[in-house]
Image (cartoon, grey):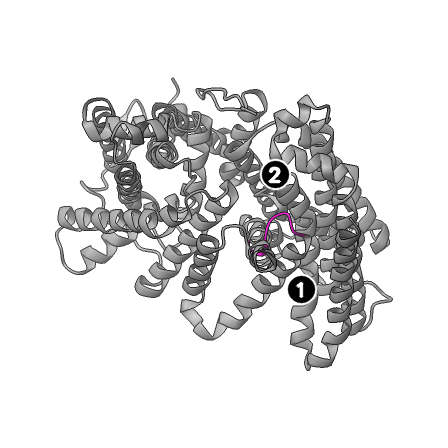
Amino acid sequence: MNKLKSARTGGILVLMAIIAVLPLFLDNAFQFEIAILIFFNAIVCIGLNLLVGYGGQISLGHGAFVGLGAYGSAILTMQQEWDPLLSMVVAAAFTGGLCFIIARPILKLKGHYLAMATLGMGIIISIVINTEDQLTGGPDGMYVDGLSFMTDQIQWYWLIGGLLVFSVWASLNLIHSPIGRALRAVHGSEVAAEVVGVDTTQYKVLIFVVSGVFASVVGSLGVYYSNFVTPDIAGFFHSIELVVMVVFGGMASTFGAVIGAAILTILPQVLTFLHDFEHLVFGLILMLTMIFLPKGLVPTIADFFKKGDK
Amino acid sequence: MSAEFLQFLFSGVTLGATYALVGLGFSIIYNASHVINFAQGEFVMMGGMGTVFFLGLGLPMPVAILAAIALTTLFGFGLERFAIAPARGASVVTLIIITIGASIVMRGLVQVVWGKEFHAIPSFSGDEPIMIGGATILPQSLWVLGVTVLLVLALRYFFEKTIMGKAIIATSLNRDAALLMGINVRLVLFISFGLSAALGAAAGILVAPITLTNFEAGIMLGLKGFCAAILGGLGNGMGAVAGGMIVGIAEAMGAGYWISEYKDAVAFILILLVLFFKPSGLFGKTGTERV
């Protein structure tokens, strides 16, 4: 147990060190932009990983929750002239509330039926955002004022980097709490978990709400950072991208989610030199990784080293 | 029946027939392998785009259509052999992502080789609308319906009367038992993916004269075909056909009587409502989990 605990703190320390040292190696605004984007994606993925990796549920509609946070903040600050931080909290509460309401009927579903339901819910939300253009600006998106006290990109770097460390810490603590153990039991076998007295529904609902709120907060902050939002943020492809990050890095591994987010945020940037071949090569890399490392990067590498120990 | 209603119904069943074929493709692959193939829509797209390409080479229409179906079937075989078979035993989410990767690859390939433009295929027998009860129907819609009916009947025959068809059913019921009975399970999987790809391609070719096609044309068609398959209960072939029809008609009625902007949302609203009350689709078996 002590060893477990030290591995946890060790991981967080390494992450903090990387975030602290990274600015020395970033020489322009674009590279900072990518780093911040990685942090944003990683935070959503940590939340999603709780649901997918630990809870054993599937969500193909998580982009919609990011979109709700983003548009909630955008509409409240720009059209109601609310304070941005208050807007963020209200948007997160709204998203959390929505998750709470739909969690019971949706999480009753299993496997592919659950995939269909979350996918359908995400697509409906994204169609609404695209269509209600008086509120959302439609497909053209809308401009949003930033946070008045955040004047510099480097401030954003530290803010979102700090938030990432906090998210990793919160996620690791949740996983190693009684709630986390109950969740893993649900993943193993829901019926068995229920038989030994775990209230599986309650835990699934809780984790669905938590991951929705993670996504919503990131959506809000992302809008304040970039000052602009388009419906793509809630779209099917963004949802798929998020799940892919989680699975690519390794399900049921918090650091896997962070590494998956980092690689899959950087990869498309690296591949732009391929021009038209970009998507083709991206798809191939994705397929090959999942075929040969079906558990994802981090768990496969971890297994490799564990075998080495013996 | 008012002419307006009849008009919406005509476009609904045409759409529905297409969704039914795509949904059937999902069902066949799911039955054989328990994989949901997110590249099913790309098979549909490749049928349409392939026909455009072979017509461009100067081939006559029937030859171009067969060539496009053959090409797409090859991709189906390839997907099974090089991506699904090596990943045997991977989790549901991993398999979903592999097929999503395959769909990205196919879209990327078509975009690189054949470009991003929209293309049309000429209708099979002219564009002169036919008047029925005050509403009009395009001859191409009749082609869509007629060929769908024929394909569904042919598939029923295949699954009920032929050795290969029965082998696929046996594999879907119990893979290990099928293997022990001497069924070549690898061949069954291989054939299922090819068959499913061919069906998808046929659907894509049938609708291309009505809807136009480009490298992204398969995305929505694939998702709605998935709706059809889930609505009918996964793995239930006739359920998928019924599901496709329900989705198509609901969509046409929704667009006609409600708001046309929300046309694409209808299928998904419908599927959520159904799943809330019947968690395994309209005609699906309720499963039990063994501990």
Say which quarter of the image contains residue B88. top left
The residues colored magenta run: A248-253
Image position, residue A177 (x, y; %): 79, 41
**In this rendering, would A137 be left or right of B23?**
right
Q: Can residue B172 be seen in this view?
A: yes
Q: Which mark is residue A176?
A: none
Same subunit, tags 1 and 2 = yes
Of the residues under marks 1 and 2, which one precedes in the sequence?
1
Task: Based on the picture, tell me whether residue A294 belongs to the magenta stretch.
Answer: no
Dominant secondary structure, magenta: loop
What residue did someone put label 2 on?
Answer: A56
Q: Which residue lies furthest to the top in this view?
A: B1
Question: Which residue lies at the image location 71% right of the left edge and 30% below the top edge?
Answer: A101
Residue toward you, A181 or B268:
A181
What residue did someone put label 1 on?
Answer: A37
Q: What residue type is labelled 1?
A: Leu
Question: Which residue lies at the image location 50% right of the left edge and 20% below the top edge?
Answer: B286
Residue toward you, A201 or B170:
B170
- Circle 1 chain: A
Q: Is residue B77 above or below residue B178?
A: below
**In this rendering, would A301 be left or right of B114?**
right
Residue toward you, A115 or A122:
A115
Q: What element carries label 2?
A: loop
Question: Which residue lies at the image location 62% right of the left edge and 30% below the top edge?
Answer: A106
